[in-house]
Amino acid sequence: MTETETEAPRRLSKGERTRARILESAAELFARSGFLAVSLRDIAAHAGLTHAGVLHHFPGKEALLLDVLSRRDELDARRLFPAVLDPGEPEPEPAERLRLLLDVVDRNARTPGLVALYAKLSAEASDPDHPAHGYFVRRYQVLRRELTGLLAELFAAGGVREDPAAVAQQLLALMDGLQTQWLLDPDAVDMAEQVRAFLRHCGVAAEERG
């Protein structure tokens, strides 16, 4: 394909760039202080906008929070479990999905702000009245379902006699707990290696870092 046939990347409009800046500021402030302690005016000031400017793009703080959370989850889902977003989309082979999952864990170790955001907000959202409560309930339902399916395929291929649903819950609990420990003392915790060790203990061959 020649250069003239290659479609050039679409440039973001001014409104799209402003919206992205608001989301970045919100994610940073939510990770630092939690949802409850941050106001829309705080986010506006951090993004260099007026309060009205933020409201032009988002109807309220709750909508902004859910957009912050879903934006990153969608990026991961498109790589790991594309059929969740598009039922007609073929999924990668189980071994490739496992590699992508471990890549996400590795990447988290380079994005402390994102890890802090999820750790803080998931704890806050245990309150049924929290605006992100339903989001996190659904998120864990999807993760349990998709990880159970992935592990079932890996166990079948390797002749492993484990309950994939139980191991999926254990894996999620391990990852959440490791993130909290890593936030407290990052030099003492290697999240990706601990996840690999757990999978090997369950009979799944997890590739070492490249």
Image: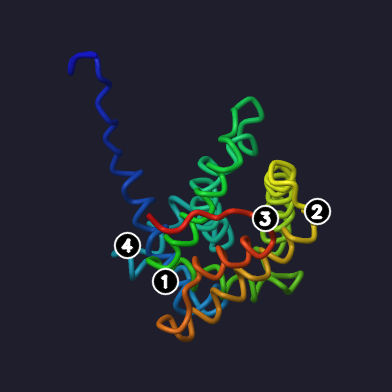
Q: CA–CA distance between discs 2 and 1?
A: 36 Å
Residue density around tag 1, few if under 14, some if 14–19, many if 20 or more, within 10 Å: some
Residue sitting at x 46%, y 54%: 103
Give me the residue at 54% from left, 57% from top: 69
Q: State how far apart marks 1 and 3 are (Cα).
A: 20 Å
Mark 3 is surrounded, within 10 Å at the Cα level, by few (under 14), some (14 to 19) or many (20 or more) other residues, namely some
Mark 2 residue element = loop
For marks 2 and 4 on the same chain, the one whose residue lies earlier in the sequence: 4
First in residue order: circle 4 vs circle 3? 4
Residue annotated with mark 1: 112
Q: Is residue 115 left or right of residue 48?
A: right
> Hey, which quadrant is residue 46 in on the image?
bottom left
Instruction: Give the label on residue 49, or none.
Output: 4
Residue type pointed to by label 2: Arg
Identify the disc placed on residue 161. Answer: 2
Query: For the residues carrying marks 4 and 3, which lies nearer the camera in this image?
Result: 3
Distance from disc 1 to disc 4, alpha carbons, whole Å, reads 25 Å
Q: Circle 4 — which element?
A: loop
Report which residue position mark 3 lands on.
139
Identity of the residue drawn at 38% across and 57% down? 53
Foreground pick, 4 / 154: 154
* Residue type, label 3: Arg
Compare marks 1 and 3 and give the one earlier in the sequence: 1
Local crowd size for mark 2, using a 10 Å CA cut-off: few (<14), some (14–19), many (≥20): few
Which marked residue is nearer to the observer: mark 2 or mark 3?
A: 2
